[in-house]
Amino acid sequence: MTQEAKNIWVLVDHRGGKVANVTLEALGLARKLADASSQEVWAVLLADDAGSVDTERLIACGADVVLVAEHPKLDAYRDDPYTDVVTHLVKSYEPAAFIIGATSSGKSLAPRLAARLRTGLASECVDLEWDGEKGLVAVRPMYGGNVLATVETPEARPQLATLRMKSAPRPEPDTSRTGRVEKADLSGLEITDRVKLLEAVETGGGEVKLEEADIVVSGGRGVGKPENFALIKALADACRGAMGASRAAVDAGWVPYAHQVGQTGKTVSPKVYIACGISGAIQHLAGMKSSDIIVAINKNPDAPIFKVATYGIVGDLFEIVPLLTEEIKKETA
Amino acid sequence: MCMKQVPETTEVKIDQAQNRVDTGGLTRIINPYDTYALEEAIRIKENSGATVTVVSMGPDEVDQSLREALAMGADEAVRLSDPAFEGSDPLATAYILARGIEKLGDYDLIICGRQAMDGSSGNVGPGVAEELGLPQVTFVRKIEELKEGYIRLQRMTDDGYEVLEGPLPMLITVVKEINEPRLASLKGLMKAKRVTIPVWGLSDLGADPSRVGPSGSPTVVAKVAPPPPRSGGEIIEGTPEEQVKTLVAKLKAQKVL
């Protein structure tokens, strides 16, 4: 691909008609980059029936064009058909940059796509900028967040990036924005389909997703036993947030792995992170220290968590957490 | 099984004058995510009689981690090393690993950790799959069934998991939930010490020089910097009731509740 490549693409991550928040965040960010460089923002929507997705909303959130690719094999995310179709679209339209949300499907697709297109990919970026000469300049954490690397792709196009959830503000939809919907031509395209999806199971039961929650309440070793996690859950619910856990609590079998925050678990950056009975090992900090506000509740005044906490309470979590739950319920009722 | 050797800690120094991360003097270990991949490979071997080969790219000191993998139960290890490989980004690394795996010949399943602890890109596994033209499943949390030419597995998603099936050969990347890795036995370590680990370079692999090192790497790291510092804030004093009231008032004042 050549330097003539133009426009910034955002992949629409959707399921059951619902568009992922990180897609909207990416659209807002792409809008900013495109405005600074006189380019268009294209929302790229792959589906078996695109009618389930609100394209007006994609336009209101920053897209100039919604590029729709419909095919029966695009009924759910799978690596093979998505890679084939996106590759075809990229070769047909030659975008300059392509931003994909760092969801479980985005993190699977992007590296596969980068290898097929032989282009550069910056993964799990926390910020993206546009440079007149270099194009997309990506900032991504390495070494568990202890290093921020600036990654560039000088020659290859499109420049790929996956964007970490909640790294950019969600745009206010502007319904006065106009855009067009363009249908991609997939006729004659051979689409591979080697892996079959037998079942998709939601274990969260409609709970707020950990990576998307504005408030995360996590429990650690100090919680003591599995039953006590009910206190953590109650506080998370009162905050309309999500429940997290430290590695110690997960390894002890108190909480499922899906809740683990830290180096070998999930990375979160909510508005408020409340750490209860968590000492604050470096591996845990790697997963939460970019939170806006950190609250630490721990009986050990020397716990390292207090070194990163915006507000610290030295005390017994079994006393503090229920009081806090009640107070928040009262104040937000 | 693909393995990377990484520094034992992520608390690294940044050499700002040289614009690079300084990992000198740090003990080097098997990337923690790769220990799950290795354990899964060894379990498959124990259940099926398969052989496990560990492939890694890197300098001489990587042999120590390869020996540890042998001591855990891997059958063979190969190291890919060449001055031309230096400065390879994830795409070039995937290309090199794929050429190494191709040279090894027959394989049914390639297992990688979901990402490396240092670079944390998670790009190499799917890159190897693409280079070899294999189907892939990422973030695998369980292998439900594995038989001649067929695999059924569970893949972790953002809000649960998926059950998928597909043909072998395939490449999978695994998450921590899949197993609990064993430790290498002392006896195994002693035995592994005597093994000669083959080292394959650019010409052994018949690799295209333009696809390795800086010339095969579309990305460059233009700058490394420490994250903005975060200092300890305020300890809230008082009785538990007062502490809680003060905290809630502060959070409300910042409009986050």
Image (cartoon, rainbow, N blue to C red):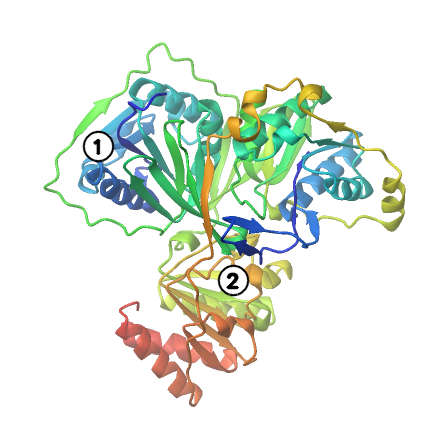
From the top left corner, tell me how far across and down residue B91 is, in percent.
Answer: 53, 30
Q: Amino acid at mark 1?
A: Glu
Which residue is most to the bottom? B239
Q: Quadrant of residue B206?
A: top right
Q: How many residues crowd around disc 1 within 10 Å: few (fewer than 14), some, or many (20 or more)?
A: many
Q: Quadrant of the N terminus of chain A?
A: top left
Residue at position x 47%, y 60% from top? A288
Mark 2: which secondary structure? helix
Query: In the visual, does A56 lie left or right of B171?
Result: left
Q: Quadrant of residue B242?
A: bottom left
Q: Chain of mark 2?
A: A
Q: Quadrant of the C terminus of chain A?
A: bottom left
Residue A90's place in the image compared with B185, above or below, is above
Same chain assignment for discs 1 and 2: yes
From the top left corner, tell me how far across and down residue A63 is, in percent.
Answer: 22, 36
**Earlier-in-chain disc, 1 versus 2:** 1
From the top left corner, tell me how far across and down residue A270 is, in percent.
Answer: 38, 60
The residue labelled by disc 1 is: A40
Residue at position x 62%, y 20% from top? B207
Residue A296's place in the image compared with A64, above or below, is below
Residue at position x 76%, y 49% from top? B182
Residue at position x 62%, y 51% from top? B23
Residue A191 in view (yes/no): yes
The residue labelled by disc 2 is: A285
Q: Which mark is residue A305?
A: none
Q: Nearer the viewer, residue A126 or A190?
A: A126
Which residue is most to the left? A176
Q: Amino acid at mark 2?
A: Leu
